[in-house]
Amino acid sequence: MKPVPRSLSEIRDLIKEGKITLPNLINSCLENIKSQKDLNAFISVFEKDAMQNAEIVQKKIIGGKAGKLAGLVISVKDVISVKDRLMTCGSKMLSNYTAPYNATAIERILKEDAIIIGKTNCDEFAMGSSNENSYFGAVRNPFDSKRVPGGSSGGSAVSVAAGMCTASLGSDTGGSVRQPASFCGITGLKVTYGRISRYGLTAFASSFDSIGILANDINDTAEILNCISGYDENDITSSKKPVRDYYKEIQKEINPKDIIIGYAKEAFETGIQDEIRETILLKLEELSKRGYRVKEISLPNTDYIIPVYYILTSAECSSNLSRYDGVRYGYRAELEATDGIEEMYTRTRSEGFGEEVKRRIMLGTYVLSSGYYEQYYKKAQKARQLIIKDFGNAFKKADYIITPTTPTTAFKISEKTDNPLEMYMSDILTVSANLAGLPAVSIPAGKDKNGLPVGLQITGKKFDEAGILRLAKYIL
Amino acid sequence: MTGIQEKYLPVIGLEIHSQLNTNTKAFCGCSAKHNSPPNTNVCPVCLGSPGALPVLNKKAVYLALKAGIALNCRINYKSVFARKNYFYPDLPKGYQITQYETPLCYDGSIEIPVQNNLKKRIGIERIHIEEDAGKSIHEISETETLLDFNRCGIPLIEIVTKPEINSPEEAAVLAKKIRRILTFLNICDGNMEEGSLRFDANISLKHRDKKEQYGKTEIKNLNSFKYLKDALNLEIQRQKYLIESENKIKHNTINYDATNKKIAVLRTKEEEEDYRYFPEPDLIPLTVTKELIAEIKNSIQELPEDKKERFLIQYQIPESKADILTRNKMICEYFENTINLLKIKNTEQFKNTANWIVREVIRELNESISKNIDDFPVKPKHLSSLLDILYTGKINIMTAKEVFRIMIQAKDEKEKDPEYIIKSHNFYQIQDESEIEDIIIGILKVYTEETNKYRSGEHKIEGFLIGKIMKLTEGRANPETVKKILKKIVFEVQSGI
């Protein structure tokens, strides 16, 4: 593997000192993509364009006229629209689909001179926790290629961890940025619902989805967040709250005594790998020693998290994925002359979607059906309110909540594919932030005995991205 | 048949789909114009491209509220959009954005005239905002269905009445009245041929004595008042037949075939899809303020029916004219502005004004490109002055029409002034009778043969002679005066001509 600088500031320094050029850097990234093809991180690579843009941005940097993200090499999860590029969503259904416009987040990073190197592999329509549900094959973990990288933004996490780029934009509906970041030993931020425009992010579950940032360096996370967050008139659910200068915010000193860290005992109970529990408890102890106040808080409705999450996200996904019908774009089954519209729909959708996606569409269709709507969807909405309330109460006592990001470190490929429920449980610690619309970040906290990364998750109050990133920087 | 009609009382409710008069679509910036080339008014949002999100058109909300207020509805200050899920090729997202549990307006009412000068109040259940679907075109190809998504996403309101209509005639009267309100307030263009306004009707029969209510059916997609009435009449006959022959009335959807004047059962409701409604997560709840509602109330003031009543009393104009003048708010305003500017204000002048606008202005308007009275070159100021001049007899009606045509063509303000036109064209009527006499004598000398025929009783020659005289005076003589003098010269004076 070619060495690649870990952070934007490093890249900028090296360029200024004349030690590297941006085209050199792109070359190294491209070589790393090629030499690690077995990891299967990318679905499309923009070799030519990335190189051309590198030359343009290099000149801008030298001329002192470059944007805030100049020097950054970014990969984009293949569920986010990049104009005139394939956007497959990891699905056969969209394997031939070209996006007609740029997502707002893409517009914003391009305006700041980031270079997009390609689109990364992911679980089909971002549904999965292992990146095994991709039409383009499983993605492999760079720490152990027999293991999964996590999902659904597995390709994004691997691309950053394996020196194929400096940062990546992913999407997080129930942990899809944080869990793979944790499995691959990098930083993964999921923002407050509405902080980053969803315009151009292929919808999985609209009231849960958010674009997330995967990076090696938390300063880069903050800088990217500066550029892409903020109100967008194309997404009415995006927030008008002013954007803080996250980069500046996280450079500020913290007075540990001002901060109360919540310790949610439910998150350390059954099902958590011992080494993870120990690693995170050790971190909490360290923090306490440094003067932070660590306080036990309770999230009493933890048992409902997984069922509520799967009922609501499946309901929304069943409707969001109705548009893939073979009529206007994407895959259409080959039909006999005698086949009617029913056959076209049935065959197109049966052949175009993978097993997990179909499972969730069926589950979602069921919970929205008349007679079951009240029993499942409405009840789950009520339970969602209870979970939000739990967090409200917890944040009256604490400023941040620290938990492990995942119950286990990266598991083996195929280990959980036959047991969807067990697979769903790997999201147990991450989905609550999506249920409650809260910001959360996963940072590397150590390694288990197999040398696999362990992730620590900090969850904060709504719109306190600055706070969680500052604490994360401190812990790192 | 009348016997049976008395036995059963029809119970009818209407669902009125009305496209809203907005420039752009309900949830994107695409043009809402009709008759554009297929698939030219489309974008990622209305085509349902992955990642595209809806943004609500405020004008649509404004117009929907206007309809709600005009129909005496209560307003939900916070209403919620919902997704209605079903698969259809012209529905790109696989769901329609509509309102379900919490509509924008509810619990309104409207009065319609019934027999014996009585009025009947019909309840409005709800009015909600939704988006239109695209169009499937089956006629062009035998093997393929073509799709045009231009209509897809155009904002609609659905007005749902309570089932309080008791005859097809009442249904048609109500539909007409609602159309009039919607077009008058510029909420909808009311064009039923183009589908801007269309009706669904649900109907059941009730036994008058036994009070038993039989099964209900729904007639879909009626786009004329006549079809509405005809389809309901046919369906009443069908239901009666079923009841009399002791068959159950199934919850069917009925299609009306206007060409063959027949109804056909499309499908039973039991076979219908489950729409799996749930709140639209891509839109935040719609909130409206009291200020906005007050503003809209203020802007409505008088509805067409009230205006018409007032015109009849205040200006004493005939009902047929009042009817035409109150079809469009801007024409109403034009009429009243002209009246206000008249120097001579009496009922005769009011009638003249009404006649002139109905006969001349509206006719010109229909032939113009814009069809909008605001763009009409002759403003109330000049029209009122023309009507005043006409009233004083300084010009005759033929000349007035000529002046009016000149006013339409005129380039600047001064040239539009009828006073100026009359002067510069020397249009004033010849007041001096001796001057007319001289002209008549001159004409009679030229047409001696005709004069003799006329004198010997060939009455039809009169028109010919008057025509010649009018031509010579360039229309400036009063035809009545000409006739009077002509008769006097030919029959009384015997001046040896």
Image (spheres, rainbow, N blue to C red):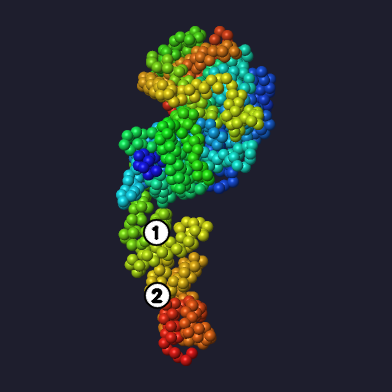
Q: Residue at x 44, y 10 (%)?
A: A269
Dot 2 corresponds to which residue?
Answer: B393
Which residue is at the front of the view, A34 or A376?
A: A376
Q: Amino acid at mark 2?
A: Gly
Is residue A75 depicted above or below A179 in this figure?
below
Dot 1 corresponds to which residue?
Answer: B320
Q: Residue at x 48, y 49 (%)?
A: B191
Query: Across the whole image, how many numbered discs are drawn on residues?
Result: 2
Is residue B237 depicted above or below B338 in this figure?
above
Does label 2 lie on the same chain as label 1? yes
Q: Residue at x 54, y 39 (%)?
A: B134
Instruction: Mark yes or no: residue B230 visible.
Output: yes
Which residue is at the front of the view, B315 or A331?
A: B315
Res. A25 mark: none
Give percent across and percent down for residue B3.
36, 42
Q: In terms of secondary structure, where does tag 2 sit? A: loop
Q: In terms of secondary structure, where does tag 1 sit? A: helix
Which residue is at the front of the view, B89 or A261?
A: B89
Judging from the image, mark 1 belongs to the subunit labelled B
In this image, A403 relative to A167: left or right?
left
As drawn, the residue found furthest toward the bottom would be B496
Q: Amino acid at mark 1?
A: Ser
The answer to which image quadrant residue A467 occupies is top left
In this image, B250 relative to B148: left or right?
left
Instruction: Mark yes or no: residue A20 visible.
Output: no
Structural distance between the alpha carbons of marks 1 and 2: 27 Å
